[in-house]
Image (spheres, helix red, strand yellow):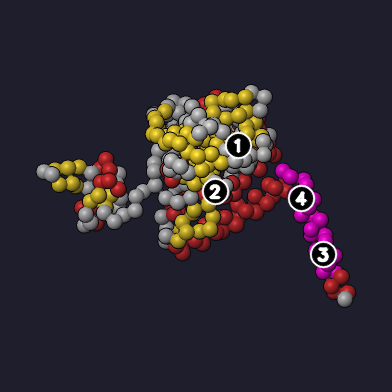
Amino acid sequence: LKVLASDCTTSGGSVNCPCCNCCEAPCDCDSGGCAGDEPSPPTGGFCFSGESTVDVLNKGTVKMEDLKIGDKVLVGVDGKYEPIYSFGHFDTSVVKTEFLQIRTSTSSGLEMTPNHLIFMQGNEAVPASSIKVGDKVMMASGKTDTVVSIQEVKRTGIFAPFTSSGTIVTNGILSSSFATIQKSHYVSLGGFEVPLTYHQLGVVFESPHRLLCHLWGLDECARYERYDEGGTSQWVEKPMVAFQWLLEQNIVVSGILFFISFAFLCMINLIEMLVVSPVYAMCLMAAFVADRRRRRVNKML
């Protein structure tokens, strides 16, 4: 029963909100709805602006709007580069979107939507909207830097490159490929917070997509990349609608469906790790063989 502040109108000095009229609660246009309601999470997409920059292997600094699938971008503090296998969002012509421009003492200004995740000190991915001046964010150097200014800007175009690790260094700041669609960076079901962050969920959620791209190859994967009118990838659009529906259900329904789906995705994630990393597969096999031998020795004793 919440509405945006734009739905609040004044008449004769009094404030009228449609939602408050129906739920018989005092209106609070500053919070975007009925008094006593928690503010809704920021809106406006889950992406970077085209002005944000990344470090591309053998190319140097490249604007987000100029990236393409297959570009190897800096993804972590260890100097590791990974190829972009997809874009969760890619649109150069979408109407102007509101971004937060976050500057540190050494960063030229990262621009991302309020719900997009950025890594703070302690390697915790939180929504950009929760960052304040004076907070410390993780940099590509592995050190932290202090946020010196945050301002709202409007840009045309929205972009969200996906990498295998789910991270990307933008304007020197370590960022996530993902965003939250709730108030917190933790998943909440039926009002109960789950010990799972949206960054972790995003990495697991993308497992089937990443696995297919690894098996097909990036060129073939790029050939099947499709976006809707708003620039959202077909790999994101329908699952996102389903997940938002799930969040609207009661705790019993949402809990059962979520954990069944999450368990399935975790299995795909394990298969992906075995396929992509032979070393991981060998270590897992060695551990399995060692465990079998231990059991046999215990039986003999």
Q: Which residue is mark 4?
A: 281
* Residue at 49% over, 53% down: 186
* Kind of residue at disc 1: Ala
**What amino acid is at disc 4?**
Ala
Nearer the viewer's eye, disc 2 or disc 3?
Answer: 2
Residue with the mark numbered 2: 124
Amino acid type assigned to the residue bearing label 2 in the image:
Glu
Outermost residue on the left side: it is 12
Disc with the residue nearer the chain's start (1 vs 2):
2
Q: Is residue 100 left or right of residue 213?
A: left
Residue under numbered circle 1 = 140
Q: Position of residue 145 (x, y in %)?
A: 53, 39
Question: Does the magenta segment cover residue 107?
Answer: no
Residue 110 is at least partly visible in this image = no
Provide the residue designation for mark 3.
292
Disc 1 from disc 2: Cα separation: 15 Å
Secondary structure of the residue carrying numbered label 3: helix
Q: Is residue 35 left or right of residue 77?
A: left
**Mark 2 Cα-neighbour bin, 10 Å: few <14, some 14–19, many ≥20:** some
